[in-house]
Image (cartoon, rainbow, N blue to C red):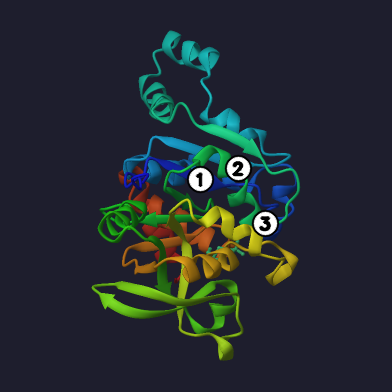
Amino acid sequence: MVKKKTRVRKAVIPAAGLGTRFLPVTKSMPKEMLPIIDKPVIHYVVEEAFDSGIDDILIITGRGKRAVEDYFDDAPELRMHLERHGKNQQLKDLNEISRFRGIHFTRQTEPKGLGDAVRSAEKHCGDDPFAVLLGDDIMKDGIPCTRRLIDVFEKTGGSVIAVQEVAKKDISKYGIIKGREEGDNLFLLEDIVEKPRAEHAPSNLGAIGRYVFTPALFPCFDLVTPGAGGEIQLTDAIRQLMKKEDVYAYKYTGKRFDTGDKLGYIETIIEYAMEDEGMKGELGEYIRKKGM
Ligand code: G1P
C-alpha cells in the first residue's frame, strides 16, 4: 500500500480571472498586480505560501498576465543600476522578491472558472497534497492562514477549507458551508453551496479563498458540470470530495482583505499605510480632517 503523503509543500495560486470588477484598469493590467502601496497583491499571497513552509508554487495565469511572471523574475539591469547609484534600500526591497525564485507558471487557455483553473494543476501536484490560495485575498495574522490549514491537515489527514462569518448581504458572493462542530474553530463539512441566496444558505460561514486538498480532489472534477455562473466551480468538486472522504472547515480568526472588491482594496491600502511609520501620522491626520 502506498503511504499517504502528509507534508504540504506545493501550492496552486489561480490568477487567471479577467478582473471584471476592476475594469477598465484590468483591461491591460492583471488584477493581481494592483498595488498595495508598493507591492502587488500577489506578492502578499506568495509570501503567505512561503511563510507557511511551502516552496513549490504553481501560478495559473492566462492571456494578458505576463506582468505577474515578470514581477517574480530577476531584473539584472535594474539591480545593477541600483547598485551603481548606491540605492541600498531599493536594492533590499528588490532582493526581497528573489526569495520567491523558482515559481512555476501555467496558462489557463479559456476562463472556464476557478474549478477548471485548479484542475489544470493536476500534473504538477501528482499524488501530493497541496494548498490553494486565491489571488484576491490577503490574510493578516501572526500565523499565516495557510499554515493553520496545514496544521489541521497534518492532524486530521483530510482536506480543509478556511471559512469566516460573512454578512447576510454578502452571502451570495461566497461558497457557503454547512458543518458539524468538531472542536475549536473546526467543523466537519456536511455541505457547501456556491453563491446561494441568503435565504437558502446553510449558514453564514463563507469560504475565504484558502484551502488544503488531498490529491483525491482531482478525479472529482470528472463529476462536475458547469455550475454557478456557467463556470466549473471548485465548490462543486469539494461537494464530490466530501462523498469520498472527510473534509474539514477551519474558522479563521485573523483579518482578511478582499482586494478584488473596490472598497476592500481601499481598506487594504489604508491598513498597510497605517502600519508604515513614515505615513501613518500624516495619513491619520488626513482621514481625521475628512471627518471619517
Ligand atoms: C471564489 C469561490 C468561492 C469563495 C470565494 C472567496 O469565488 O468560488 O467559493 O467563497 O472565491 O473569495 P469568486 O470570488 O472567485 O467569485
Mark 1 residue type: Val
Residue 234 image point, x, y percent: 58, 61
Element at badge 3? helix
Of residues 26 and 207, which is closer to you in this image? 207
Element at badge 1? strand
Residue 286 image point, x, y percent: 43, 59
Q: Is residue 59 above or below residue 256?
A: above
Q: Quadrant of ligand 1?
A: bottom right
Q: Is residue 29 above or below residue 78?
A: below
Which label's residue is closer to the chain start, 2 or 3?
3
Of residues 21 and 175, which is closer to you in this image? 175
* Residue at 62 percent of width and 58 percent of height: 221
Residue on which disc 3 sits: 22
Which label's residue is closer to the chain start, 1 or 3?
1
Residue on which disc 1 sits: 12
Binning the other alpha carbons within 10 Å of mark 1 as few (below 14), some (14 to 19) or many (20 upward) gives many
Q: Which mark is residue 60?
A: 2
Q: Looking at the image, can residue 252 be seen?
A: yes
How far apart marks 2 and 3 lie (CA) works out to 19 Å
Mark 3 residue type: Phe
Residue 185 image point, x, y percent: 28, 72
Contact, mark 2 vs mark 3 (Cβ under 8 Å)? no
Residue farthest along the front direction in this orientation: 1
* Residue at 39 percent of width and 56 percent of height: 139
How far apart marks 1 and 3 lie (CA) works out to 23 Å
Q: Quadrant of residue 159?
A: bottom left
